[in-house]
Image (cartoon, rainbow, N blue to C red):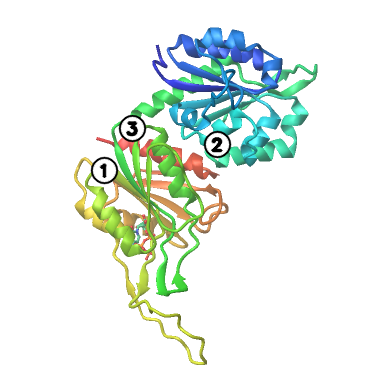
Amino acid sequence: MRLDKKKIILGITGSIAAYKAVFLLRLLVKEGAEVQVVITQAGKEFITPVTLSALSGKPIISEFFGANDGVWNSHVDLGLWADLMLVAPATATTIGKMANGIADNMLVTTYLSAKCPVFVAPAMDLDMFAHPSTQNNLKILQEFGNIIIDPGEGQLASGLEGKGRMEEPENILEIVIDYFERKKKLLNKTFLVTAGPTFEKIDPVRFIGNYSSGKMGYSIAEELAAQGADVILVSGPVSVFTNKKGINVIRVESADEMFSECVKHFGECNGAVMCAAVADFTPVKAEFQKTKRGNKNWDLELQPTKDIAAALGKAKSDKQILVGFALETNDEIINAKKKLQKKKFDFIVLNSLNEFGAGFQVDTNKITIIDKNNNQQSFELKSKKEVAVDIVDKMISLLP
Ligand code: CTP
């Protein structure tokens, strides 16, 4: 059985495709999964709770309060219990509620409490699916790290033909199994990831920083965790966040703090990805009090920071892999190769600020990977989440 003892929440919403959820439930259970069905009010108009509870072997959950007085269904416990949540079929309404945190039913509150990966299989009429509102909400869910199972094209319940049919249960099952199988690749492995900028204090109200958003580093941390790894994510000040299982976020501010945390944890790791845009210089001294405006120029003396990647490169054993980044504006390949050697990286991920869609603050990236054996591979422009998959796949291929 390929889903032995896997704990899955199956969220069912009010769509004609709810009948397909019955087949899906059966397939999941046949593969050994323990499935808890959470259904919306509208979902119950399409299939009966009795069928679902008979197939899952558990009472289904729909309301905040159970049939007996004083029983409260805890969405928090449920969200923490699951290894995976699957919303199939997902209507435009539920997708909108999930994207905007409208927690007025058990399914959405469970979703908001879930720490596991969430898969969403939309089902609706073609025009509803194509509407910018639905597309926008799906994009938001993707940005949260949820996986959208694209609907197929074909005959719809409305009689129209087009894109909006929920993916077939057999295919959804394979996607779920594939997820758990991929996950096994990095089980019992720990990786250190640095992300975001560092802030170097000038005085209590000012700092030297940079434009790094942390998106690339957080996506790599989430992809490593999705493949079963434990991740120590040493993050500079960013507005992105992650609540994925297996990721321990250590927040730091300066390059020096990031250095200390990395050196402290690297020994227990199978490898590290140095994704942070670490400041190269820091003020020689930070003022205790705010420097007042004056008419004279302010000469700020800066000193170099410690090179975290180079320190880990020195400390690294044969069993550990080290991945670096290079953001270049000129002589990209030559500069990246120099850094690869100098810092003893196993491979370096090069992004050029000259490439459209690559670099700071954007959701996409266009990378070239150069490894220590001089293999060079260029990738097309992709979302940072997809780029993270390419980077983690390369890491897996190099693991001893
Ligand atoms: N890096 C680091 N610690 C630093 C500076 C850089 O760990 N103090 C890491 C980055 O996370 C990245 C790699 O080293 O993985 C290359 O960073 P980059 O800023 O491109 O290189 P530098 O060595 O700082 O060289 P320069 O800025 O002069 O190009």
Q: CA distance from mark 1 to mark 2?
A: 31 Å
Q: Residue at x 45, y 67 (%)?
A: 209
**Which corner quadrant of the figure contains ligand 1?**
bottom left
Residue 190 visible somewhere in the drawing: yes
- Bin the neighbour count of mark 2 within 10 Å (Cα to Cα): few under 14, some 14-19, many 20 and up: some
Q: CA distance from mark 3 to mark 2?
A: 26 Å
The tag earlier along the polypeptide, 3 or 2, is 2
Q: CA distance from mark 3 to mark 1?
A: 12 Å
Question: In the rendered structure, which amino acid carries the disc numbered 3?
Answer: Leu
- Bin the neighbour count of mark 1 within 10 Å (Cα to Cα): few under 14, some 14-19, many 20 and up: some
Image quadrant of residue 139?
top right
Q: Look at the numbered disc 2 and give the secondary structure of its residue.
A: helix
Residue 291, percent across and down? 45, 83
- Name the quadrant of the C terminus: top left
Residue 112 marker: 2
Question: In the rendered structure, which amino acid carries the disc numbered 2?
Answer: Leu
Question: In the rendered structure, which amino acid carries the disc numbered 1?
Answer: Cys
* Camera-nearest residue between 216 and 374: 216
Which residue is tagged 1?
Answer: 269
Which residue is tagged 3?
Answer: 186
The tag earlier along the polypeptide, 3 or 1, is 3
